[in-house]
Image (cartoon, rainbow, N blue to C red):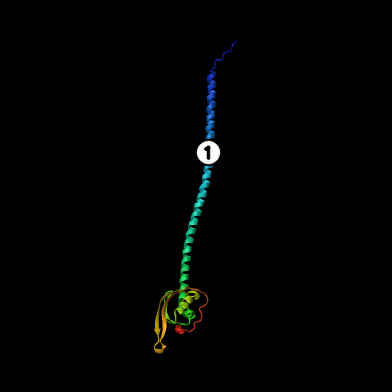
Amino acid sequence: MVRINLLPHREARRKERKTAFVAMLVAAMFAGGLLVIVVGGVISSRIAVQNERNEFIQAENTKLDVQIREIATLKQEIAALKARQQAVEDLQSDRNQPVYLMDELVKQVPDGIYLRAFKQAGQKVTLNGHAQSNEHVSTLLRNLGNVSPWLEQPELVEIRAATTGQGKDLRRVFEFTVNVAIKRSPRTEATPAIVPVSVASNRP
């Protein structure tokens, strides 16, 4: 006997395939959603860590900015203190300059030179006097420029022939004017003892 299956087996098989496809689609969507959630969580975690690092760096930068401003303020204060200290030292040095100047002129003025007057204006001194010869003036300039620890940069302003005295005492001399600069604090030893001297001690 021949058996004939009259059930809609094709529709049932198609329905099974559709159900399996839907199930696979749902599973793929679920897996995809789960993967997105996991990846998103990892990325969010890394972003959070990076944000914490950025905040830490910003906080440290802020601290460094504050420290830099404090250092700049300290540098300004140090510079101001140094300026005040230098001013005090200059005043101390300037107070003793007349003593050093008198003592130094006695040491550096050679024989044959007679100083009539000198005038100080700040760190500059103008010397006026007589010399027996031009060589004596040259010796004075060398002493002031190369030997003296207190004086520097001598400059001959004027030199001219003149006469001094009368009658038998009439002599031919050279009147000169010399400018010289005073050094600031060339030595740190104690102020030397003041010895009474005469600027006009070297007469021709």
Q: Which of the two residues, 136 or 182, is positioned nearer the viewer here?
A: 136
| Spot occupied by residue 27 in the image (x, y as percentages of width and height) | 54, 31
Q: Nearer the viewer, residue 79 or 174?
A: 174
Q: Is residue 96 visible?
A: no
Counting the numbered discs, the total is 1
Residue appearing at x 54%, y 32% in the figure: 28
Furthest-right residue in this view = 1
In the rendered view of the protein, which quadrant contains the N terminus? top right
> Where is mark 1, residue-wise?
37
Q: Position of residue 200 (x, y in %)?
A: 44, 84
From the viewer's side, name the closer residue of 152 and 101: 152
Q: Is residue 198 above or below residue 148?
A: below
Percent from the top left, x then y, of residue 116? 42, 82
Task: Please give the name of the residue rendered at 54% of the width and 37% of the height, measured from the top-left corner.
Answer: 35
Q: Residue furthest bottom?
A: 168
Q: Of helix, strand and loop, which one carries label 1?
A: helix
Q: In this orientation, does residue 37 appear? A: yes
- What's the residue type where badge 1 is placed? Ile
The residue carrying pointer 1 sits among few (fewer than 14), some (14 to 19) or many (20 or more) residues within 10 Å by Cα, namely few
97 or 146, which is in the foreground? 146
Q: Residue furthest top?
A: 1
Residue at the image point whose x is 51% and y is 52% from the top: 57
Question: Quarter of the image containing the C terminus?
Answer: bottom left
Q: Where's residue 63, x and y in %?
A: 50, 56
